[in-house]
Amino acid sequence: MLVEVADDTRIAQREANEDSSLSVALAAGESPWGFRAVVAVADGMGGHNAGDVASGIAIAAVEEVVVARTGPPAEAGLNAGSAPGEVVAQAARLASARICDRAAAALDLAEMGTTLTMAALLEDTAFIAHVGDSRAWRVGAAGIEQLTQDHSWVAEQVRAGAMTPDEARRSPLRHQITRTVGTSRTVEPDVHEVEVHGGDVILVSSDGLSECLSDQEIHRILVGSADVADACTRLLDAAVAAGAHDNVTVAAMAVGTFPGSGADEQVTEPEPAKEEPAAAPDETTAPEATPMPAATPERPHTAEPPQAPAEALQAPAEALPAEEPAAPLHEVAGRPPNRRAIIALGALLLIVAAGAALIFAWPTLRGPQAAGPDQPPIIEAPTGPEGLAAGEPEAATTEQAPVEETPAPEPPITLASLAITLEQPVLSLAVADATAATITEVEPLPGFDADLSDVGAVEYRFRNWANSGPPLQEGRAWLEFTLRSDAEDAAAEEPITWRAGDGDLDLLPGTWRCAYNSHVREAPLELFDFTLAAGGE
């Protein structure tokens, strides 16, 4: 049966590609296990050191153990009678051990890891081995089926019923993986067998694809492609167009006749289908919009709107003769006064009241007048608080002024200078001026070795220095110092960095955390805490 394979990758919005992939088609008898094709994808852990190194090691192990054109390596512990499922599982285990060995030999590779998903085809059965959140699917003309379950925190919540799939896709913890290759020397992959028929495609990918495209979109694009290579390219293009942030990598094997019937015919069909819903609203809204143009020209041509206000104004005029409000008062004697008379009388009373108020308020409005020659001068009452004399409040205010004075600022704290030296295999931190400050204690974080020497210097011993080379290479690695307000929180908003060749470092007295970082890390590797005190011993 004809088998075609392909793989492809995109960097998307990352600075570097930490994914690795493999797609191999094998002739009959070329594989010691009888495999006809092998595809695999490894997604290096972006939050740790050198994810690209880890994914590369994993794919190399798959090629050596599963493809094994020259026979499997002895360290894999396999023989000619090994079961196919054990072969793919052993490839994942060997990859994890190799990544751990490499990380232990280099500080800047510490804690690196990767996902790994592979599929090996034997006759009409595909053997799947899976660790992490890279996925595998079986795709045919009739539909798509996901073959793996993510080893992630959100996937576990979905399986437990504590989170919906939509909530998992939007969760900020969706990248938290619970099982990886390389963070432990031993890892146990999920392994299972899948029956494959002619026209099926086995697709594996990094999570960059599944985060951007649904299963239905993947199926539509794949069956609308000309062949397996075209499908890989179109899937990656679609993921990038959908705004992929992570690297996107796919590898696929097609068994027998490819399920698509040509990219040109199939890919263009869904687009008109998407336009049909847009055309339908136009047709449904057309009858609603039809009366609107007819109603608009009626407004200037009709004469009824201007006449309605005139008729409304004439209605009260017809009722006025019955009341005869303008008749003289002697003609309506004995009848209650009408409304106009009441209004007129009220207005007259208001005018009289306003005039009286103005007369009484006039002296006040004019203000105080000068005393006449025969009158004693008018002395106004004091306006100060509690009836005090006019001068007394000022005196009281003058006496209280010193209380509001701002205290003088404290003198600035003198910075302590810290000298950093690198002597194989020790990183030494010592105060440059022992009379100005001193290091009083050091506390290594779990898994690291640091102590305080007799001369009051911190000594941190690197692991496997001979194999890792200088750890603080300029432009690649540096130390970070963060002021600690307590054991958990950092008081400094931004860490202070020190690179090889920077000279002395100025730090405030307090407890500081020293961490290692590099251009491939997203989070620093915290090494130890030390306390810096002002004043020498």
Image (spheres, helix red, strand yellow):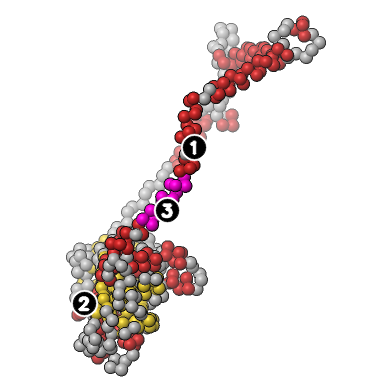
* Residue labelled with disc 2: 468
Residue type of the residue flagged with mark 2: Ser
Asked if one can make out residue 187 in the rendered structure from this viewpoint, the answer is: no
Report the disc number at residue 291.
Answer: 1
Q: Position of residue 70 (x, y in %)?
A: 20, 88
Q: Is residue 30 left or right of residue 131?
A: left
- Identify the image quadrant of residue 425: bottom left
* Vertical order, 516 against 269 (above or below): below
* Vertical order, 458 against 333 (above or below): below
Magenta stretch: give its range: 272-285
Q: Position of residue 179 (x, y in %)?
A: 38, 77
Q: Secondary structure at mark 3?
A: helix
Residue type of the residue flagged with mark 1: Pro
Report the disc number at residue 383.
Answer: none
* Residue labelled with disc 3: 277
Say if the magenta span includes residue 278. yes
Residue occupying image coordinates x 65% and y 15%: 317
Residue occupying image coordinates x 41% and y 67%: 173
